[in-house]
Amino acid sequence: MTIGRYLLRRLGLAIFVAFGVLAVTFVISRVVPSSPERLYAGARANPETIALVHQRLGLDRPLTVQFARYLASLIRGDLGESYATKRPILEDLRIFLPATLELVSLASFLALVVGIPVGVLSGAQRGRLFDRLARLISLSGVSIPLFWMALLLQLVFFGLLGLLPLGGRVDPVVSVTNHIETITGFNVIDAAITRNSIALLDAVRHLILPVSVLAIYPVALTIRMTRASMIEALSEDYILAARAAGLPESRVLFRLALRNALIPTLTVLGLTFAYSITGAFLVEIVFAWPGVGKYVADAILAADFPVVMAVTLVVTIVYIVVNLVVDLIQAAIDPRIRLG
Amino acid sequence: MKPLGPIQRWLGNPAIPRLEPGSALWFFRRDRVGMACSGFLLIVVVVAVLAPYLTAHAAEGRGEPNLPDKFLPPSVEHPLGTDVLGRDQVARVLYGARVALSVALVIVGLSVLIGVTLGALAGYFGGWVDDAIMRITDVFLAFPPLLLAIAIAAALGPSLTNAMIAIALAWWPWYARLVRAQALSVRERNYVRAARSIGVDDLTIIRRHIIPNVLTPVFVQAAMDMGSAIITSAGLSFIGLGPQPPMADWGLMVNEGRAYLLGGRWWISTFPGFALFLTALAFNLLGDSVRDASDPRVRGAGA
């Protein structure tokens, strides 16, 4: 089928799935808990508040009516109010989302820039020293508990060596003397645009540890997957033919094999995004990075349930969109997908 | 093939893995790394089971405080130090192994159970059953894995059981997909068609023919997932959604030691985390070996 029809089909599926996600989050937030009122009102609410919440949430109405009200409030943009900050969650997300996106995008970028070349070379040099080292490192990378690595690095680089800051996005002194004007919400970009070099350096220094830790899993995963698909691509007949024809090895590797090996690697991008989101939770906790992850983690500790559900919903929708885009790019590159 | 021994005949010639050259098990035996990991994990299992007898501080392992001894650095008497409540870390790490292993088993087991059942039903019956189950799978797969687990765990309340249920509910779709694909092909095989033609009912067919023959990829995936199960549940514990104190859970212990890390008491967080790393690494290596042993392409030239 043509790209157009594939796009429509895929879009239709995405919309259906998004609706299903809404249904599941509704079930988790209203039906699953033994006492939803207590989750929304807070642990120390008195009976009057609980009755009020019960009525506000419409928990006495039939489930279908509840779901309809749930959808209606979402369309209005009302994601609920955070019990802890007493602000609409949508507002909170607007503040915290860019910080997390900064981490996630840099980590994914590292995954591409480091993971793919290493994976390619590793696959090409299968069994040799480089490959063995790369396999060891990437296997360790997917086995390391993120939060533990983050703590260790923090201990070494801040506690022992004093080279990098403990956490946060900006140094408190710098944020007063060289405050970054918020244009995009991404400190590095904003500081660069406004030529605020001191703040730029500060922002970068604060980024190094969180991004490095967050990137461990995506880089390791990318290496493993690129290596595997490289090995598979290199065993194909056309590679043998190209080598027999005398094509230089670098062309064989990067022009022929890599192109075909990259296709599954694109799926990895979608996966790395998913893992980066969840990894960002843990990293943000350790480094006190003011992003969505820390927001949710604090909410969990404070039993601020509306935040947990709202963030789950928003992040999942974003994830669906990212997967959709990745699928469409893949379909555009690889005709087998839309024809098969 | 070797002739069947009396025991095998009595069991009805089940699909026991045999050590013939070229079989999956034979490849696995030759894989030194895989064997080493199996050995290591076997030791871990034994240690976990025998934990109460391997340490003089069993009560502390279970969580009882021992305040006079708090914050002791690693020494001969307490090789891994003591934590904020004076509990011996060796005992805590040992008891944590029990939690980690049982959690991984339950999570993977539950996911496999749900996933295999639904996948077999979807693959065998086809039609609207297949569509319905696959749509549900799609919806569950749309969630970033850990996030769904976090949401469910938050809704159910923080506890060990709830964390296990939450993660299993996030993971079963992978197995359902896997099994469905296998079931679709097994369904067309001659013995299944024969069974149906003589009127064997569907559930018996599923039980006797479909499920035993779809289990190989499930087993491989499960082996590979054990490592992730440990890491994921540790992540949930670190956030506070898993086992609660005073239970000895490695993720929880890393979290508990966090406040004291920069104050010079590094051993409380470091050792449980290292245990997590080693165990997950072993499981991941093992999973890789299992996959390599069963993958026909990797088995060598000419396979």
Image (cartoon, helix red, strand yellow):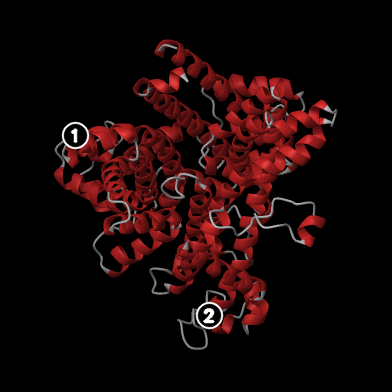
In terms of depth relative to the viewer, which is nearer, A279 or A143? Answer: A143
Spot occupied by residue A5 in the image (x, y as percentages of width and height)? 45, 11
Tell me the kind of residue under disc 2.
Lys
Instruction: Looking at the picture, tell me which residue is in the foreground, B282 or B97.
Output: B282
Residue B268 on image: x %, y %: 48, 71
Instruction: Tell if the residue under mark 1 belongs to the same chain as the one under mark 2.
Output: no
Residue furthest out toward the bottom? B76
Query: Would you name the residue on which mark 1 appears?
Result: A245
The circle on residue B92 is none
Q: How many marks?
A: 2
Is residue B258 placed above or below A80 in the rendered structure?
Answer: below
| Chain ID of residue with mark 2 | B
- Residue at screen point 55% across, 50% down: B225
Q: CA distance from mark 1 to mark 2?
A: 72 Å
Three-letter code, disc 1: Ala
Picture disc at residue B70: 2
Q: Specify whether A189 is left or right of B183.
A: left
Chain of the residue on which disc 1 is drawn:
A
Badge 1 marks a residue whose secondary structure is loop
**Mark 2 neighbour density, 10 Å: few (under 14) some (14–19) many (20 or more):** some
Find residue A253 and report its image quarter.
top left
Instruction: From the top left corner, tell me how far across and down residue B163 is, in percent.
Output: 63, 51
Residue drawn 38% across and 20% down? A335
Q: Are marks 1 and 2 in contact (CB under 8 Å)?
A: no
Residue placed at 54% from the left, 76% from the top? Answer: B89
Q: Is residue A171 visible in this depiction of the protein?
A: no
Left or right, A36 with reference to A313: right
Q: Mark 1: few, some, or many residues within 10 Å (few <14, many ≥20)?
A: few
Q: Quadrant of the N terminus of chain B?
A: bottom right
Q: Quadrant of residue A272?
A: top left
